[in-house]
Image (cartoon, helix red, strand yellow):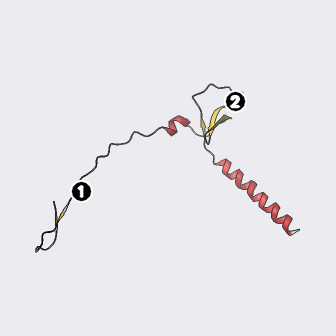
Amino acid sequence: MKLKTAICGAFALTVLGAGAALADAKIYPETRFGNFCPAGHQPVRIDGVICCGQPNQSVSYQSMMRLPAGKVHRAKSAKRALCPVGEKGCRTQ
């Protein structure tokens, strides 16, 4: 009897955990394809899979995946430490 209770408890926790994980899924509207979904739905992308549904994000999947136009980073030359023999301390060059 204890084994049956433990199995039912584990199953309930698994089902509840899966529901919480699905509630946090980001659903993006898909704009590249025609709308062949039933009335009230539109093409959406959930974790890379296209299906019919209601998006919960305001931006499309393509604009979210677009690379940001970042700044051009220039490498700075490293300053060399000059430590002459017989003198106290070092200085940069």
Q: Could you say which is closer to the camera, residue 87 or residue 56?
A: 87
As displayed, is residue 37 above or below residue 77?
above
Q: Splitting the image into 4 quarters, where does residue 12 fall?
A: bottom right
Q: Which residue is mark 2?
A: 40
Q: Residue at x 20, y 60 (%)?
A: 80
Q: Which residue is mark 1?
A: 78
Q: Position of residue 62 (x, y in %)?
A: 53, 35
Q: Position of residue 47 (x, y in %)?
A: 61, 42
**For residue 84, side relative to residue 72 (left or right):** left
- What is the C-alpha distance between the residues marked 2 and 1? 60 Å
As displayed, is residue 39 above or below residue 20?
above
Tell whether label 1 touches label 2 (CB within 8 Å). Answer: no
Q: Splitting the image into 4 quarters, where does residue 40 fall?
A: top right
Q: Residue at x 68, y 48 (%)?
A: 22
- First in sequence, mark 2 or 1: give its number: 2
Please indicate, yes or no, whether residue 59 appears anywhere in the rendered image. Answer: no
Q: Label 1 sits on what residue type?
A: Ala
**For residue 32, side relative to residue 1 (left or right):** left
Look at the image and tell me in which quarter the N terminus lies.
bottom right
Q: Position of residue 82 (x, y in %)?
A: 16, 65
Q: Provide the secondary structure element on which disc 2 rests.
A: loop
Q: Could you say which is closer to the camera, residue 33 or residue 75?
A: 75
Please indicate, yes or no, whether residue 76 appears anywhere in the rendered image. Answer: yes
As displayed, is residue 81 above or below residue 50?
below
**For residue 67, side relative to residue 55 (left or right):** left
Q: Residue at x 82, y 61 (%)?
A: 8
